[in-house]
Image (cartoon, helix red, strand yellow):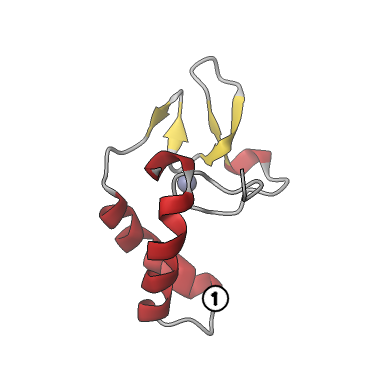
Amino acid sequence: MTTINSCQSCGMPLAGADNLCGTNRDGSINKNYCNYCYQDGEYTSDISIEEMIQICIPHVVNANKEMDKKAAQEMLEEYLPTLDRWK
Ligand SMILES: [Zn+2]
């Protein structure tokens, strides 16, 4: 793992935030995924990486004021393929 405590589907930082983490089928916490992407042992939506990039762009722009949509998309196109879900 090159990145620690980021969702391995959307890349959202999960550092120290168990309430943001996904859940396994038995209800335990899965720290590899956020609870938007992964609940009860399954991905919450069956989407392609291209769709995930489009979903993530506004969140990245919101969180990084210096980034515009184009910069966010370029960053996501580089970053998301490195995550476990998309490898
Ligand atoms: Zn996620």
In the rendered view of the protein, which quadrant contains the N terminus?
top right
Q: Is residue 39 above or below residue 50?
A: above
The answer to whether residue 56 is left or right of residue 65 is left
In the rendered view of the protein, which quadrant contains the C terminus?
top left
Q: Residue furthest top?
A: 26
Q: Residue furthest right?
A: 16
Cβ of mark 1 under 8 Å from ligand 1: the answer is: no
Residue at image position (54%, 71%) is: 63
Query: Dot 1: what SS?
Result: loop
Q: Amino acid at mark 1?
A: Asn
Give x and y (percent) for residue 83: 48, 47
Instruction: Tell me the crowding category of disc 1: few under 14, some 14 to 19, or many 20 or more residues within 10 angstroms, Cα based.
Output: few
Q: Nearer the viewer, residue 76 or 18?
A: 76
Residue at image position (33%, 54%) is: 52
Give x and y (percent) for residue 44: 36, 36
The answer to whether residue 80 is left or right of residue 16 is left
Give x and y (percent) for residue 55: 34, 59
The number of callouts visible is 1
Residue at image position (62%, 49%) is: 2
Give x and y (percent) for residue 85: 42, 40
Image quadrant in which you'd find residue 57: bottom left
The answer to whether residue 16 is left or right of residue 32 is right
Residue at image position (53%, 85%) is: 66
The answer to whether residue 32 is left or right of residue 39 is right
Label 1 sits on residue: 64
Q: Nearer the viewer, residue 81 or 35?
A: 81
